Image (tube, grey):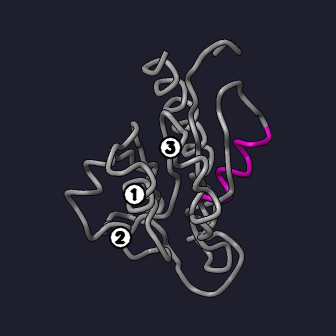
Amino acid sequence: MNSNSKCRVWVAGLGNVLMCDDGAGVETARILAESPQSGVVVSEVGTAIMFYTNLISDAESILLIDAVTSGKKPGTVSLFSSEDMDESGKLWRSAHELSLLDAVDIFRHGKRPTIKIIGVEPERIEYGMELSPSIKKVIPEMLALARKTISEMACTNI
């Protein structure tokens, strides 16, 4: 994406790094941030969603990366739209102090940008700072899906 583009993609790594696999989104964002791209902002949000209201308000597209409990095999990586998350309600609404979808609705007065969610099925959500082997193994898959999704989001907003 060139520097004159109005496109802006915000990538938010969500989760609690003190709860094993719940930190998978933050770890993925940390690695993505090591290779910056023009027009893309990557944040290791964790659970501090309220500190990112400026990015929530301004982003043209948002990619969220988080552990999502959906009953699939641990380590399963899925791509959801915000509509998928709205329909399933049980996913995500209470995982953090304020869900990012709720924050987007509040700070954008119900006018949502394009939102995609990369979710990984956790193996362990318990106290600890290390990802389980099944999650460590799929971090490269999460990174590849994130890069592909960022590219697609950037192209649709030009």
Q: Is residue 61 left or right of residue 91?
A: right
Per the image, the residue denoted by label 1 is 101
Q: Which numbered dot is residue 93?
A: 2
Q: Compared with residue 52, is residue 130 higher up or lower down, i.e. above or below?
A: below
Q: Reading the chain from its start, which is encountered first: label 1 or label 2?
A: 2
Q: Which numbered dot is residue 138?
A: none
Magenta stretch?
25-34
Q: Which numbered dot is residue 63?
A: 3
Badge 3 crowding class, 10 Å Cα cut-off, few under 14, some 14 to 19, many 20 or more, is many
Quadrant of residue 74 within the rendered picture: bottom left
Residue drawn at x 41%, y 43% is 116
Q: Amino acid at mark 3?
A: Leu
Badge 2 crowding class, 10 Å Cα cut-off, few under 14, some 14 to 19, many 20 or more, is some
Q: Is residue 139 left or right of residue 155?
A: right
- Picture coordinates of residue 52 (x, y %)? 62, 56
Judged from the image, the secondary structure of the residue bearing numbered disc 2 is loop
Look at the image and say whether residue 27 sits in the magenta stretch: yes
